[in-house]
Amino acid sequence: MDEKLIIAFARFEEGQKEHERARVIYKYALDHLPKEKCQEIYKNYTIHEKKFGSRGAIEDVIVSKRRFQYEEEVKANPLNYDAWFDYLRLIEADSDVEQIRDTYERAIANIPPSQDKRFWRRYIYLWINYALFEELGAEDEERTRQVYKACLDILPHKKFTFAKIWLLFAQFELRQKNLQNARKVMGVAIGKCPKNKLFRGYIDMELQLREFERCRVLYEKFLEFGPENCTTWIKYAELETILGDIERARGVYELAIKQTKLDMPEVLWKAYIDFEIEQEEFNNTRNLYRRLLQRTKHVKVWISFAQFEKTTGEENSIQNTREIFREATSALKQSDEKEERLMVLESWQAFEAECGDEESQKKVEKLLPQKVKKRRKIQTDDGSDAGWEEYYDYIFPDETTAQPNLKLLAMAKKWKQAQELPDDTEKDVDEAMDQDSDSDSD
């Protein structure tokens, strides 16, 4: 068998207009010659089909050539999963079930040598595609189940797992109306390798089945696994609210805020406060704000508390809102947080503009600070000087130590204005500055 002899034989038949015989010769050569010796045969076969073959015949040649290329790629590097995906996509177009299964089996046999999850991320999709083909393409329920089980058997669950496989397996069993099998799959999953995604998937499945008691049990196990997860606490409380068990929902929130370690405590507290507002339990909401303020004096908590009082619509809501703003201003003054204190005053000013009168607005305006530009030295990590930088500071009216500086700044401002005024006006400004100086000495 020689490549040149085969091509010469096929060309002879082509010259005798025996195109079918030429086609058989080319196919025989492709089936029996080593792949590395078929490049010229593929080329001549393609030219022959373009000249004398049908559209289907041309496509067969092209597909055959691509199949040869993919075979070479996966032989050169069996762990090239992208090449396997492309090869399988080509094979599936032929709808030959046995050939597709054989190719999938060859592909999944190439298990990643490392037990590092990132090397498995592409490989696991070979199994997923295989299972989907058996379910949707071959419509073989039992083989689909075997594919999922085989995949779960090879995963090193003690080091890592793929929640997606467990969830797909359970969803497949549900589609087959095998509820007990689906629950068994998810039960094994959270028992063998508990993960947030597995718990959430199991709970969502039971929610869709309207098995609320099972959901409660799952939430309790979920919180035993991760008590610091605020999202789980909130979802559990929301479930109880939807079911109409308000006291149980409140109990869930109380247990949640008593946890020593939480990943997003601010989100949990906000959810609890919003829950009490929705129930129109305003006294409970006030107590929650007070309890939160014992833990943190954050400016946003104060502003949120004031805005809540404003929206209650109760008889003393305006006065209560003012009182909260006063408390906030006093508390932030003691902590020396000037920018946060300014934020409270600006919110208070906006509140008075909406709900207050002229007198109350003037009272808040008197509390607003003056913004001044200052300079300070910059030092590097090693302690050496790196120049100066400008920054803005706020001087509040009740800061007596800053008053002389303010008066000096006011005099400097007058002097600057005097440089831009006519001589007569400048003389008047000088006299005013002299009077200020005399009053300072007194």
Image (cartoon, grey):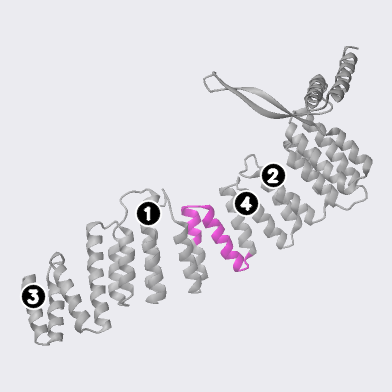
Name the secondary structure under disc 1.
helix
Range drawn in magenta: 186-211
Tell me the distance, in whole angstroms, between the alpha carbons under discs 4 and 3: 71 Å
Name the secondary structure under disc 2.
helix
Give the residue drawn at x 12%, y 72%. Answer: 32
Which residue is the site of mark 2? 257
Tell me the distance, in whole angstroms, between the alpha carbons under discs 1 and 4: 29 Å
Give the residue drawn at x 29%, y 60%. Answer: 109
Q: Earlier in the sequence, mark 1 or mark 2?
A: 1
Left or right side of 435 for 108 = left
Crowding at label 2, few (<14), some or many (≥20) Cα neighbours within 10 Å? some
Q: Position of residue 265 (x, y in %)?
A: 66, 44
Left or right side of 438 for 69 = left
Q: Which circle marks residue 231 in the picture?
A: 4
- Residue 61 appears in the picture as rendered: yes
Which residue extends farthest top? Answer: 441
Crowding at label 4, few (<14), some or many (≥20) Cα neighbours within 10 Å? some
Which residue is the site of mark 1? 120
The amino acid pointed to by label 4 is Thr
